[in-house]
Image (tube, rainbow, N blue to C red):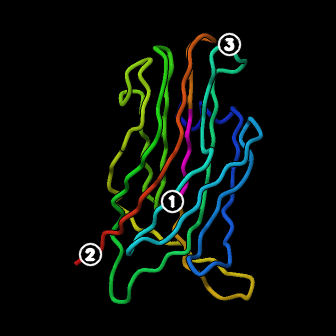
Amino acid sequence: MSLIGRIGPVALALLVATVSPSPAQQVAARGDAADGIPVRLLCTPKALGLVCSATNVRAAVTSGIGGRSQTLTIAPYQPFATPRGRTLQGFDVTITAYVSRSDGGRVLLIADIGGDARSLDLSNHVSPGRGGIRTIRFATDSGWISETFNEDGAAVRRLPMHLMLTAQTKTVADTARLDLIEVELKPVFRD
């Protein structure tokens, strides 16, 4: 059975991005996590790419609390346009996250950016009982941009980005936690 099939039954919060009217065109994915605290992912342009900062984007399983798996999905569709005459090949992605787990804990991140999905088991990035901030880097091989329409009917090009954070444990005594801090996307163009 696929990973998606195994974690499908767990509580899944799908947060849809909204566009603010600010000149920086920030996008915020908003909603409530399982604990009721607001979740936010704000994306702003940086050079030719984007930087998305996270607030309370967390999947966590605490020792002694019912349930041994938690998943959080966020999906901001950030307005994105490539410079004229350039063809987008993909992105260099840098993800900064806080990761911690006990010996029986597991933390996963699935990132689909521009149509190229990566499944990252971050359990190997942290020793049991020794959590901390980790930086994960990878490159995508796809630069798919979707086209949607705004309220006025004008076409808007957007970068599809889906991030799924999962924390799992073997026993009720175990812990696992994954907090998304920042996602930086640098476009790579074909020559």
Q: Please state which of the two labelled residues, at mark 2 or mark 1, is closer to the viewer.
A: 1
- Quick check: 138 above or below 151? above
State the residue at coordinates (69%, 40%).
12
Callout 2: 10 Å neighbours few (<14), some, many (20+)? few
**Residue 53 at x, y percent in the picture:** 53, 56
Instruction: Tell me, yes or no, whether the two marked residues, 2 and 1, touch with CB atoms within 8 Å.
Output: no
Q: Residue at x 73, y 88 (%)?
A: 152
Q: CA distance from mark 2 to mark 3?
A: 51 Å
Which circle marks residue 95 in the picture? none
Residue wearing tag 1 = 52
Looking at the rendering, the stretch of residues picked out in magenta corresponds to 161-166
Q: Position of residue 28 (x, y in %)?
A: 64, 62
Find disc 2 in the rendering and name its residue: 190
Q: Nearer the viewer, residue 113 or 105?
A: 105
Dominant SS of magenta comes to strand
Local SS, label 1 = strand
Tell me what residue is drawn at x 37 percent, y 53 percent.
94
The amino acid beneath tag 1 is Cys
Question: Is residue 113 part of the magenta span, yes or no?
Answer: no
Can you give x and y, in whole percent of width and height, for residue 30 in the image? Answer: 70, 55
Q: Earlier in the sequence, mark 2 or mark 3?
A: 3
Could you say whether the residue bearing mark 2 is in a helix, strand or loop?
loop
